[in-house]
Image: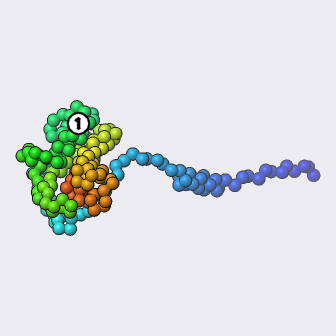
């Protein structure tokens, strides 16, 4: 008899695909993705007295229109604004309406703890952006609008309580927020570019 050749056994590769899939799942689950940019917003609670079927009618003078187009240009109250840094001052004037001008928002009397009867603005800031606008430009506009509310609240806290807003008690902060409630309405983005 001759020498028999030993055949090398084949490798069983049937479980290779399963192992590759498990490794893929492991790396997907164990990898963290940092995405720190975004807006930290809390929606206001629903008013239980408001009937959801009827939308409130808001007078034109009570709306502060801010639009951001696809070229990141800012249109505020139907006028072009060269620099987004000017938005904060314009928003503060609208929110506070210190001179009770008829072109700025109406005010209604409200009883507020620590302050008594005060006149609170009915103003709402309406923000709309183009789908093509850059996210950074949108965030900058949002930050300026938020800063307008923060500055007004801080100024009132210093005058009334002699300290900054964030150092006031929870009750004092709540009272200040009743005088300057944050009302920013964000409309769905549109495509202005044709």
Q: Is residue 11 visible?
A: yes
Residue of label 1: 86
The secondary element bearing badge 1 is classed as: helix
Q: Is residue 44 visible?
A: no
Residue furthest out toward the front: 162
At x 16%, y 45%, the residue is 94
Q: Position of residue 41 (x, y in %)?
A: 32, 53
Q: Quadrant of the C terminus?
A: top left
Q: Position of residue 54 (x, y in %)?
A: 14, 62
At x 23%, y 56%, the residue is 176
Give above or below for 51 relative to 122. below
Q: Position of residue 36 (x, y in %)?
A: 42, 47
Q: Residues within 10 Å of mark 1 (few under 14, many from 20)?
A: few
Give above or below for 149 relative to 193. below
At x 11%, y 57%, the residue is 108
Q: Nearer the viewer, residue 149 or 131?
A: 149
Q: Position of residue 87 (x, y in %)?
A: 23, 39
Numbered circles on residues, count: 1
Residue furthest out toward the bottom: 48
Residue furthest out toward the right: 1
């Amino acid at each position: 008899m001759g020498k028999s050749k030993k055949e090398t056994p084949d490798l069983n590769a049937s479980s290779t695909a399963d192992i590759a899939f498990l490794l893929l799942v492991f790396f997907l689950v164990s990898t963290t993705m940092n995405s720190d940019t975004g807006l930290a917003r809390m929606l206001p609670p629903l008013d239980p007295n408001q009937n959801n079927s009827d939308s409130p009618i808001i007078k034109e003078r009570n709306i502060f229109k801010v639009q951001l187009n696809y070229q990141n240009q800012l249109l505020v109250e139907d006028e072009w604004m060269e620099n987004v840094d000017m938005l904060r001052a314009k928003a503060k004037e609208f929110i506070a309406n210190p001179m009770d001008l008829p072109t700025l928002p109406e005010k209604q009397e409200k009883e507020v703890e620590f302050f008594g009867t005060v006149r609170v603005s009915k103003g709402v800031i309406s923000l709309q952006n183009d789908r093509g606008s850059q996210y950074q430009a949108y965030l900058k506009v949002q930050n300026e609008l938020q800063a307008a509310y923060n500055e007004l609240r801080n100024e009132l806290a210093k005058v009334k309580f002699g300290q900054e807003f964030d150092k006031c008690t929870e009750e004092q902060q709540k009272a200040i927020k009743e005088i300057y409630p944050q009302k920013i309405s964000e409309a769905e983005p549109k495509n202005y570019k044709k």
